[in-house]
Image (spheres, rainbow, N blue to C red):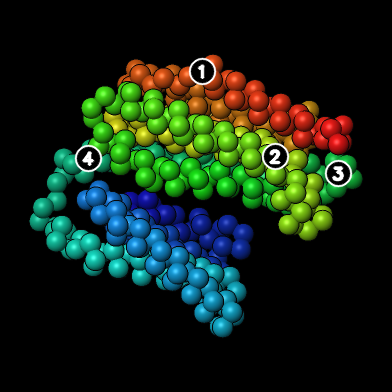
Amino acid sequence: MLGFALMAVCWPLVRLIPNAADYLVLIYACVLMSCLRTLCTQFIRSRMLNRLVAVDGVLTSATLLGFYYLFLDVLDLGANGYLLAMACSDALSAIFVFIAGHCHQYFSFKKFNKALWKDMLRYCIPMIPASISFWIINASDLFYVQGMCDGIDGKSSTWWVGLLKAGYYLPQIITIVGQIFYEAWQLSAVTEESERSAFFSKVFRVYAAVMFCCVAGVIWLCQPMMHVFREDYFLGWQFVPFLTLASMCTCLNNFLNSVYVVYKRSTSSFYTMLVGAVVNLVLNFLFIRWFGPWGVTMASFISLLIVFLLRAYSTHGLLEIDFHPAWMLLNLGLIFVEIAMLFKLEHWV
């Protein structure tokens, strides 16, 4: 909610963003409702009401689809309808969770804890630039391609941006798997206290194994799956391998971020992600010059890999996790072999 308050103060600046002024009220409504829903769901999750969280997830998906149908198909509101649907769905979710979870019983201005408020601010503030740094790693690719790839292979920069966006879809499979795991894992990471190092090591080994299998599967099937798109976008498969590896690194980074959550070291999360953002900006510039638009995917993977290595090193002083480095390198090497074979597929047919 503090973030939304800061965003409200920046209203005049946000209006300067191209095409934002026409949708500004609805954008702010979406952000506010999303904040309220997140606040309520995180609170009931902390009270171990996991069944209510699951029910809310199903109902939110159903109401979102219903509002999409109402505002986009029936009322034909276009972009306004899209934003309105998300705001209404999150609002209903927040109301449902607040009532069903009896959150009102825990809400009182008289019991405001100033010391706890300061501790929460001290923990949360570094997470804001950390999130911005993560956004830079993910979003800078498109800006670099738009600005530096015009005329490559006779194609416009807009064409390359469209191709890169098409390549983002398949790696989202890895991201979704990681998000599902992290939602379930986060609470266990905080509550598990006995033999925490062994617990984290065991879970990491299983989680990394699942990630490597998913990555291998997505890369293996990227060419046939890209046939789902228009013929013009089929070449987007060339962006998929390293974007998929980047998604895997993001998931593993989130796992290590849970160590920072347990020990309340949000500043470490910020510093490691900031290094990744700086490395990404530099590598994007260099790799586009050397490898063309495909270089941004390698830059994303390397920068997120560096974040993982930094977090693996920094968390060692907090928790001794066995990362099985030889096993990790072997799996990563096999993935690189798969990528090499994919790009030389005509020699294997």
Instruction: Name the side, left or right, on which 107 lies relative to 28.
Output: left
Name the mark on residue 8. Answer: none
> Vertically, is 141 above or below 101?
above
Residue on which disc 3 sits: 151
Q: Nearer the viewer, mark 3 or mark 2?
A: 2
Quarter placement of the C terminus: top right
Residue on which disc 4 sits: 118
The amino acid on which the numbered mark 1 sits, given as a three-letter code, is Pro
Residue 21 x/y as whole percent:
55, 65
The amino acid on which the numbered mark 2 sits, given as a three-letter code, is Trp
Q: Nearer the viewer, mark 4 or mark 2?
A: 2
Q: Gap in Å between the C-alphas at discs 3 and 4?
A: 53 Å
Q: Are marks 3 and 2 in contact (CB under 8 Å)?
A: no
Q: Earlier in the sequence, mark 3 or mark 4?
A: 4
Residue 322 x/y as whole percent:
41, 19
Q: Nearer the viewer, residue 342 or 250?
A: 342
Q: Which residue shows up at 56% across the image and 83% down it?
A: 74
Neighbourhood count class around disc 2 (C-alpha, 10 Å): few under 14, some 14–19, many 20 upward: some
